[in-house]
Image: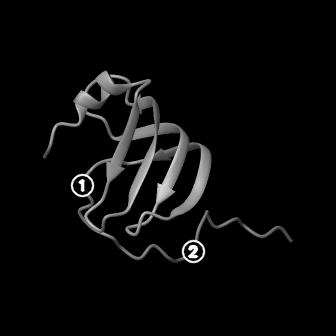
């Protein structure tokens, strides 16, 4: 697994996170979570989502995302919450 802890050194810098499709997200690296060790999530301020053709899709004042390598996508459907006993 790659070591993403070097992202801590880039806090307050403008960064670009690029994906294999050519799409990218740019913005100022506001924070990394957790605050020390391997990074699992980052928060970008003044973020811009740009498609593979270079077109601006969306602007965000703040955007939290995972900069790590995607390993799988699974369907997540079904009942939510807990069963509540019915009162009579």
Q: Could you tell which of marks 2 and 1 lies nearer the N-terminus?
A: 1
- Give the image quarter of residue 33: top left
Residue 77 falls left or right of residue 4? right
- Residue 61, position in %: x, y? 63, 42
Mark 1 residue element: loop
Q: Position of residue 42 (x, y in %)?
A: 42, 38
Is residue 70 shown above or below 53? above
Residue at the far front: name it: 54
- Crowd band around label 2 with a 10 angstrom C-alpha radius: few (<14), some (14–19), many (20+): few
Q: Residue at x 23, y 36 (%)?
A: 4
In this rendering, would 80 be left or right of 18?
A: right
Cβ–Cβ below 8 Å for labels 2 and 1?
no
Q: Is residue 73 above or below residue 43?
A: below
Q: Secondary structure at mark 2?
A: loop
Q: Is disc 1 surrounded by few (<14), some (14 to 19) or many (20+) residues within 10 Å? A: few
Quadrant of the snapshot with the C terminus: bottom right
Asked whether 14 or 41 is in front, the reply is 14
Looking at the image, is 3 positioned above or below residue 31? Answer: below
The residue carrying mark 2 is 79
- Find disc 1 in the rendering and name its residue: 69
Query: 31 and 45: which one is in front?
Result: 45
Q: Which mark is residue 30?
A: none
Furthest residue to the left? 1
Furthest residue to the right?
Answer: 88
Image location (x, y in percent) of residue 78: 52, 77
């Amino acid at each position: 697994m790659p070591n993403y802890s070097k992202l801590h050194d880039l806090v307050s810098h403008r960064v670009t996170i690029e994906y294999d499709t050519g799409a990218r997200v740019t913005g100022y690296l506001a924070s990394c979570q957790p605050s020390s060790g391997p990074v699992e999530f980052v928060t970008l301020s003044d973020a811009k989502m740009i498609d593979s053709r270079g077109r601006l899709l969306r602007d965000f004042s703040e955007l939290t995302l995972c900069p790590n390598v995607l390993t799988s996508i699974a369907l997540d459907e079904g009942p939510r919450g807990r069963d509540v006993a019915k009162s009579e």
